[in-house]
Image: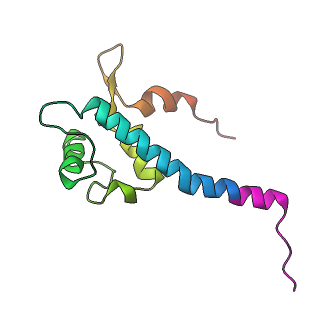
Amino acid sequence: MALQPFTNEQLNYFKFASIVLNEFAIALRQTFKSMWDNRFGHRPGYQLWDNSTVVRNLLLAEEGGKTKVPTQITYEEWDCTALFQATIYARSFATLDSKGHYETLGELYVKHHRVSPG
């Protein structure tokens, strides 16, 4: 059985998958670092994000001591799932809603825009 060449559609899928796997994580890391630095970096007792154990422990503490973000490893090793947890689903970046409750960015912007089933 001879190997068939890839179709243009398959090649486009490989290109897209490469971008998602490589570039999205880079962009999410930059976004997380910027969000951390802007919100916490200049507060007393905090520091700019430098990916040290100290600053990762500050994130863990800010999340209430429990998080789906793997703070025990460098953020360069976080995959997209961990980076989404650290940005749009993190309690650290939650904001007050009109009723005085804290809502994560995911609750504010993602929850109401989900794709309908079916």
Q: Residue at x 64, y 35 (%)?
A: 116
Residue 84 visible somewhere in the drawing: no
Position of residue 46 relative to residue 76, above or below, is above
| Residues rendered magenta in the picture | 1-14
Q: Is residue 24 left or right of residue 29?
A: right
Residue 50: percent from left, percent from top? 27, 48
Specify the farthest residue to the top: 98
Residue 51: percent from left, percent from top? 28, 51
Specify the farthest residue to the left: 45
Residue 8: percent from left, percent from top? 83, 59
Position of residue 107 relative to residue 58, above or below, is above
| Tally of numbered tags | 0
- Rendering quarter of residue 14: bottom right
**Quadrant in which the N terminus is drawn:** bottom right
**Quadrant in which the C terminus is drawn:** top right
**How was the colour assigned to the protein in this rendering?**
rainbow
Q: Residue at x 50, y 32 (%)?
A: 111
Q: Residue at x 21, y 47 (%)?
A: 55
Residue 15: percent from left, percent from top? 69, 57
Residue 24 visible somewhere in the drawing: yes
Q: Is residue 24 left or right of residue 75?
A: right
Query: In the depicted view, which residue is nearer to us: 67 or 79?
Result: 79
Residue 83 colored magenta?
Answer: no
Residue 9 colored magenta?
Answer: yes
